[in-house]
Amino acid sequence: YTFANLRRATQGFAAYLLATGQTGSVVVGHDRRFEAEHFAAAAAEVLAGNGFKVYLTDKATPTPVISFSVGAKGAVGAVNITASHNPPEDCGFKVRDANGGAIPPADLTRIEASIPAPGDGDAIKRVPLAEALRDGRIEYFDAKPAYLARVAELIDVQPIKEAGLKIVVDNM
């Protein structure tokens, strides 16, 4: 997992979005793994370089919250730097569609075919993070408030509070 390969994968995703007529904004997020924050910033630079407005999470964010943010921001997709359930020393590159869901296998094949060859740095369009932040092509955001507000709309927690239950959650 290198910055060069991450930029190649992001360029492939950007090319796929553009080839399928999807323009506008993309959400980029990450988990707490080693260098994930910096990998997310590198992905954001490439997406901004391809003309997308990028909403970059300002902190480590769970995958479901990143998926929710696609719809909340009206984005055409997302990049999530996470290896999900895999060992903590791993890192991964997940892409999401305009609904925040998984991209179908046939479209993943199209994305893979759009990834520039190793060493073809000229094929990768990118804008330095500081420049893109200054001109608004990349914007940091906290995904948590909108997600929690939506959950609060969907779940009536008062009966749960009144039930006197003791609830334990194990995310794994």
Image: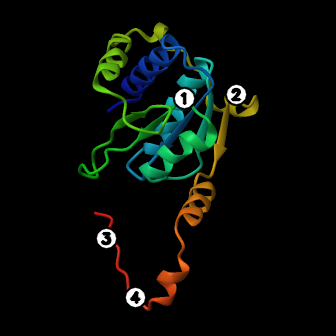
Query: Residue 87 location in percent, x, y?
Result: 23, 51
Mark 1 or mark 2, whichever is nearer to me: 1
Q: Can residue 12 be seen in this view?
A: yes
Give the mark nearer the N terminus: 4 vs 1. Answer: 1
Q: Pointer 3: what residue? A: 170
Quick one: SS at disc 2?
helix
In the picture, the disc for residue 131 is: 2
Give the alpha-carbon distance from disc 1 to disc 2, as whole Å.
Answer: 23 Å
Residue projecting furthest to the bottom: 164
Q: Which amino acid does label 3 sit on?
A: Asp
Q: Which image quarter holds the C terminus? A: bottom left
The one nearer the camera, 142 or 120, is 142
User: Who comes first in sequence, dot 2 or dot 3?
Assistant: 2
24 vs 158, nearest the viewer: 158
Q: Which mark is residue 165?
A: 4
Q: Name the residue under label 1.
A: 76
Mark 1 or 2 closer to N-term?
A: 1
Which is more toward the observer, 123 or 29?
29
Earlier-in-chain disc, 3 versus 1: 1
Question: Residue at the right extreme?
Answer: 135
> Helix or strand or loop: what does disc 1 sit on?
loop
**Image location of residue 142, percent across then percent down:** 62, 52
Q: How far apart are marks 4 and 1 (CA)?
A: 40 Å
Please state the horizontal and vertical placement of residue 60, each as a whole percent of the image. Answer: 49, 53
Q: Is residue 92 left or right of residue 127?
A: left
CA gap between label 4 and label 3 equals 16 Å
Tell me which label, 2 or 4, sits earlier in the chain: 2
